[in-house]
Image (cartoon, grey):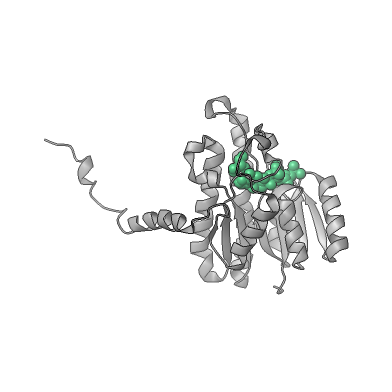
């Protein structure tokens, strides 16, 4: 793999993915852009080719559709120039759990979780074999906070965090870098899909700031990058509490508190 491997970015037509494309192009990486809106990707690619001189391919795909997903998996499996996957495509739905339809939830899980794990699964064996490369998974702080009330969306993002931690455990020793990026509210079109008014919200991060911070974490080879969390010690304490349970979770006998009296 070259010093500057090509980067495949999903959800690259707008928002966080489009800024990742811009930043990696400026670092000299060739790109493969994946999303549904070809017109937008052509416009972005045209501008970035002109400004940076990198090679950019466009791979149109609806990642909730089996045949499109298979096309992207094949590209990740077969194109040895691709050394970095940015698993960014995702969406959100508004309203409460009982107001959401089963079809909406199914599509959300298909995009945010199923497509993400399948794409990671397509590239991971090749990266592990090469002993290098990176997979960046875009999660969300919502995956840490059931109290936000975005239950299915948050569950997909908790999945992304766990998957990233598990992949780091398995693939890190083989030389593959895994990063989970957990943004909070960031100024992109996702909020239109949720039906929320960003202008009525506070503490909204600009998308360029989010991606630049995520790339600082990437360059440091950080496993979990939470750009909006100012006190890094809070994450360390949270993860430390989890690690304190290791070695205490598996026992033959139920805990004392679950034993019936008499
Ligand atoms: N913005 C925020 O506040 C936060 C965002 N995130 C996460 O960041 C990631 C990017 O979101 P963001 O940039 O904000 O959202 P946007 O809605 O701005 O962009 C989403 C991207 O995903 C693509 N996409 C959507 N559906 C599909 C599909 N079925 N198949 C292929 N591509 C698809 C869209 O392209 P197209 O329509 O052309 O297919 C677009 O490029 C998501 O995973 C999101 O959950 C996490 C926390 C906060
Ligand atoms: N994308 C946002 C929710 O819609 C978030 O993760 O904060």
Q: Can residue 94 be seen in this view?
A: yes
Name the residue nearer the viewer: 21 or 166.
21
**Residue drawn at (57%, 52%) of the image:** 228
**Residue drawn at (60%, 70%) of the image:** 129
**Residue drawn at (72%, 58%) of the image:** 8
Name the residue nearer the viewer: 113 or 65.
113
Q: Where is residue 14 in the image (x, y as percent from the top left)?
A: 75, 47
Left or right: 35 as drawn, with respect to 46: left
Name the residue nearer the viewer: 187 or 109.
187
Ligand number 1: quarter of image: top right
Q: Position of residue 115 (x, y in %)?
A: 63, 47
Q: Is residue 152 above or below residue 157?
A: above
Left or right: 255 as drawn, with respect to 7: left
For the C terminus, the quadrant is top left
Q: Which residue lies furthest to the top in this view?
A: 99
**Residue drawn at (68%, 36%) of the image:** 199
């Amino acid at each position: 793999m070259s010093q500057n491997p090509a980067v495949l970015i999903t959800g690259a037509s707008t928002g966080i993915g489009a800024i990742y494309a811009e930043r990696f192009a400026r670092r000299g990486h060739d790109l493969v852009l994946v999303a549904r809106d070809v017109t937008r990707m052509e416009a972005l690619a045209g501008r970035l080719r002109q400004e940076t001189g990198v090679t950019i391919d466009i791979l149109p795909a609806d990642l909730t559709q089996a045949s499109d997903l298979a096309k992207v998996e094949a590209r990740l499996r077969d194109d040895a120039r691709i050394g970095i996957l940015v698993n960014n495509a995702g969406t959100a739905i508004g309203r409460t759990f009982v107001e959401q339809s089963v079809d909406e939830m199914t599509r959300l899980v298909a995009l945010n979780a199923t497509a993400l794990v399948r794409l990671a699964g397509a590239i991971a064996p090749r990266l592990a074999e090469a002993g290098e490369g990176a997979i960046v998974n875009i999660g969300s702080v919502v995956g840490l906070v059931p109290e936000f009330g975005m239950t299915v969306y948050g569950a997909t993002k908790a999945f992304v965090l766990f998957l990233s931690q598990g992949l780091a455990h398995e693939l890190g020793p083989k030389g593959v870098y895994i990063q989970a990026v957990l943004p909070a509210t960031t100024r992109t079109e996702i909020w239109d899909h949720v039906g929320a008014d960003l202008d009525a919200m506070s503490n909204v991060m600009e998308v360029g700031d989010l991606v630049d911070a995520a790339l600082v974490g990437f360059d440091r080879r950080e496993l979990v990058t939470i750009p909006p969390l100012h006190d890094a010690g809070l994450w360390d304490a949270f993860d430390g509490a989890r690690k304190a349970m290791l070695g205490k979770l598996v026992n033959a006998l139920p805990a004392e508190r679950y034993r019936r009296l008499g």
